Image (cartoon, helix red, strand yellow):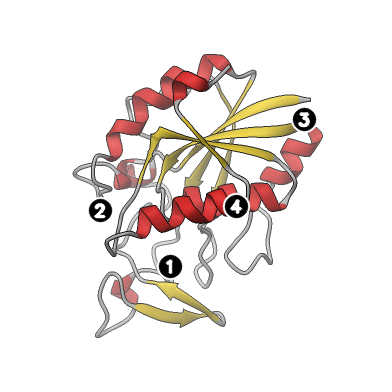
Amino acid sequence: MKKALLIVDVQNDFLPGGALPVPDGDAVIPVANLAMPLFEIVLATQDWHPANHGSFASRHPGHKTGDEVFLDGLQLTLWPDHCVQNTHGADFATELNRRPILQVFRKGTEKDSDSYSGFYDNAHRKSTGLAEYLWASDVMEITIVGLTTDYCVNFTSTDARALGLKTTVILEGVRGVELKPGDCAKALDRMRSTGVLLQSISELE
C-alpha cells in the first residue's frame, strides 16, 4: 500500500494580497515543500471557479462575504470572487514546488454548486476523480497540508476517512480563514472525531 501527500488549494488568492487572503496562509508553503520528498505520490487540489460562481457574494445583491444563502438546495457561505478559472489568483503559489505534483484535481467548477472537499462537490453528487485515482494507485493512506483548516482541509480530510483512508493532517501545514472565532478549533475537533490524525511534520516517517 502506498502513501500520498495531498496539497489542498495552495493558490494565490488564498495568500496575503489575494482576493480571499488566509491569515498567515503563506506559512503552509515551506511545510508542503519540506514534506514532498517523504512521499512517492504527491497530489494537489485546485479551486477552479467559473466567473459567475454561485458562492460569490457579488452574485447575490444585498449580501456580503460570510452570509449564508441556499444554492442547489444546500446552505452555502458567500465569499469574495476568488480562484476564477485561468486567472493569476487561481494559480498555485509561485513558491510552491510544483515539480513533484503528479496530478491536480480541480473543484468548484460548476457555477451552481460548491466543493470544499477535494473528493466531491458539497452535495456529494459529483466526484473530482481523486478517490478513483487513489484506489487505482493502491493508496490507502494520505497526509494533508494546505488551505483552509476550517473549510477545504476539514471537508477533504473527513471525506477521506469516510472513504476508509488513513488520514493525517500536518498541523504546521494548515491555516484557517476563521470567519467566526473558534472555527478552526471546531474543525480540528471534527477531524479528530472522525479519526483524522493531527500530527507535527517532525512525526512523519
Horizontal placement of 195 versus 23: left or right? Answer: right
Label 2: which secondary element:
loop
Q: Earlier in the sequence, mark 4 or mark 3?
A: 3
Q: Which residue is mark 1?
A: 53
* Labelled disc at residue 137: 3
* Labelled disc at residue 19: 2
Q: Amino acid at mark 4?
A: Thr
> Looking at the picture, how far across and down is residue 21, in whole percent?
25, 49
Residue that appears at 74% across and 31% down: 139
Q: Depth-wise, is mark 3 or mark 1 nearer the camera? A: 3
Residue that appears at 49% across and 68% down: 111
Above or below: residue 44 compared with residue 46: above
Q: Which residue is mark 4?
A: 158
Of residues 18 and 6, the one nearer the viewer is 6
Q: Earlier in the sequence, mark 2 or mark 1?
A: 2
Q: Earlier in the sequence, mark 3 or mark 1?
A: 1
Q: Are marks 2 and 4 in contact (CB under 8 Å)?
A: no
Q: Residue pushed farthest left?
A: 17
Q: Amino acid at mark 3?
A: Ser
Q: Depth-wise, is mark 2 or mark 1 nearer the camera? A: 2
Give the distance between the C-alpha atoms of the residues marked 4 and 3, in whole angstroms: 20 Å
Give the distance between the C-alpha atoms of the residues marked 4 and 1, in whole angstroms: 25 Å
Q: Amino acid at mark 1?
A: His
Q: Are marks 2 and 1 in contact (CB under 8 Å)?
A: no
